[in-house]
Structure formats: C-alpha cells, structure tokens
Image: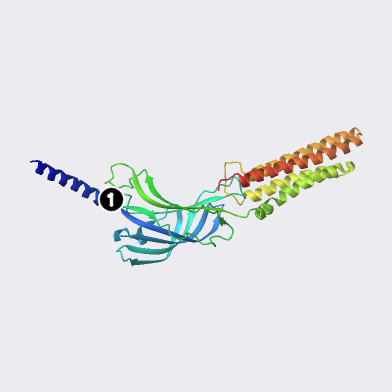
Amino acid sequence: MKKLLFFLSLFIFHSAFAKEEKHAPDTVTVGVYVNSIHDIDFKDKQYTISLWLWLKYKNPDFDFSRYLEVPMAKTVDKSFYTVDTLDDGRIYMLMKLECVMKDSWKIQNFPFDRQKLRFSIENSQYDSGDLVFVEDTVGKHYSKWTSTDWMVIPDSFNITTGIKKYETNFGDPALKMPHSEFSSYRVQIGIERDSWWLFLKLFMGMYVSFLLSFLCFFIHRDSIDARFNLSVGSLFAVIGNKYVVDASLPESTSYTLVDTLHGLTLCFIFVAVACSVYALKLSKANKLDEIRRFDKRAAWMLFLVYVLLSAWFIFHAQYSQPK
C-alpha cells in the first residue's frame, strides 16, 4: 500500500512537472548593431535608425521575418534578411532594418539638451507565455559613426528585456480578461551634441539686440529720440529672434531655456527704455551732471547683471542634466 502511494505521488509530481515544462516559453536570443542614427527631426518628433538585428531560436513558427513588431515605428524597412540553421539546431536570422521612429524630445535645455532614443521589438503573434527575449551582449552594439551631428553618451547604450503589458485582449475570445503580455527587447541610446556653435547661431541676434540697447546709454542726451528708437528696435529684434528659434522646435507647455533667455533679454531692454525715460525727465529738469552719472551706473549695472544671469541659466542647462 505504501509503495502504491509512493508511486502515485511520484506520478502526479512528474505529470505536474512535465506540464509546467511543456508550457515554459521558448527563449529567443537577440542582438543588435546600430549603423547610424540620422534625420533627427525636432519639429515632427521623429528620427531614423539603421541597424542590424539577429535572432536565434528553436521554434520555426516564430518566423520573425513576418511577425516582427517594432512599437513606436512609423515605418519599418527590412532591406535584407537571411536565415540559417546553427549546429545546435536553432534558427539563426539576420536582418537589416531602417525604421522611422516616433519619440518625445526633452527641449527644456535646448540646445544643450541630451536625448534618449528608444527602440524595441516584439513578436506580434506569440505572447510572453510562448517566447521570451534574452539579450546577446557579446561585442559592441553601435558604430563610432552612429551620427554626424550627435554623439552617443558613453555608457548610455542600454539593452534590456522585459514584459510589455497591454490592457486589451485584441479581440481574442480565448482571453477572458482584457489583458495581454508580450516579451519586449528594448534598446535605449543617450545622445548629445557639441552645442556651442548651434547656440551662437540661434542666439547671436538676441545678444546683439541687447548690446544695442546697452549702447543707448552712451548716446548724447541731445539725441534722446535716437536712444528711444534704438531701444524699441532692439525689442522687436528679440521678439523676431524668438519666433525664428521656436519655429524649429515642437510645441511645449514647459518653460524652456529659449523662453528664459529671450524673456530675460526683453526684461532688460525694457529696463533700458525705462532708464531712458528717467534720463529724459532729468534732462527736462536741466540736471546734466546727474544724467551722466546715472547713465554710467545704470549701463554697467544692467550689463553685469544680465551677463551673470544669462551665464547662470546656460550653465544650469548644460550641467544639471543627468548623463
């Protein structure tokens, strides 16, 4: 009787283990090598990535040539792929992809911004109960010529695998709950650029406008009209410069470095106009010596405070961002 119970327990345990093993998902080993990242479009929030992708798996039904899914991609071009069989019986598939990816930009610190580009793949037919991805970490994963305008931040190229959850059953009547899970292979790339030349190109007009308003303090009191005209012209020049810069950026509800610097410049030009009004009042009162002292002090005080504040905002934007 005891032997019968022992063999019965052993049979039940073996059956449960075999059932669990039967439903264990197959492993798909995935590797990636990024050739280039180009056509980074801030206005349309997209970029193009060209890469080699390889997969090693046992189940031929997975057929990634047909069922490869690239979430967040506008277009996926499979320009080349080849299939081979390895010595251990696994299928080896190599393909070259060029994808136009949608992404979100962080423009608060533009043009000193650092961006994180994301690329991921899934299998559109088999969920996480059937397959799971495992990353191939051998070798490098991107070319040193990845991008001409941007640089990959050292140690920012991260590859992870995980489960992507969808709160829907995609209309499958076999799923009782509106919930699906798919294995996901994810690549995250941190990029930055040499921003100073771009900064000078974008903000040169703004700084020249401020310098013109600064020069107003050195115009002789007899030419007060020229002093006002130069200041008002500087105001419109700064506003025009802001419209030009904003035209190259996506719409944002957050307050950016572009807004901060242009707002700061407008405020200081307004203060320069107010100082000219006060100087005109002193001129009407025939206080000539007081005008000279006031213009000299106001000019250098405004210039110094403006330079310090502008440098602080730029320094904070460039160095406060996490790598």
> Looking at this view, is 195 or 240 the one in front?
195
> Looking at this view, is 154 or 150 the one in front?
154
> Looking at this view, is 74 or 151 the one in front?
151
Locate residue 114 relative to residue 186 in the image: left or right. Answer: right
Q: Quadrant of the N terminus?
A: top left
Q: Secondary structure at mark 1?
A: loop
Q: Position of residue 208 (x, y in %)?
A: 75, 49
Q: In the rendered image, is residue 122 in sight? A: no
How many marks are shown on the rendered structure? 1
> Looking at this view, is 61 or 94 the one in front?
94
Q: Position of residue 108 (x, y in %)?
A: 59, 45
In this view, the residue farthest toward the left is 1
Q: In the rendered image, is residue 306 in sight? A: yes
Locate residue 169 relative to residue 220 in the image: left or right. Answer: left
Locate residue 219 relative to residue 75 in the image: left or right. Answer: right
Q: Position of residue 185 (x, y in %)?
A: 41, 53
Figure coloring = rainbow
Q: Residue at x 88, y 38 (%)?
A: 292
In this view, the residue farthest toward the top is 285
Q: Which residue is mark 1?
A: 24
- Three-letter amino acid code at the position of disc 1: Ala
Image quarter for residue 264?
A: top right
Image quarter for residue 177?
A: top left
Mark 1 Cα shell of 10 Å, populated few (<14), some (14-19), many (≥20): some
Locate residue 18 relative to residue 267 in the image: left or right. Answer: left
Image quarter for residue 8?
A: top left
61 over 109 or under it: above or below:
below
In this view, the residue farthest toward the front is 2
Q: Position of residue 155 (x, y in %)?
A: 52, 53
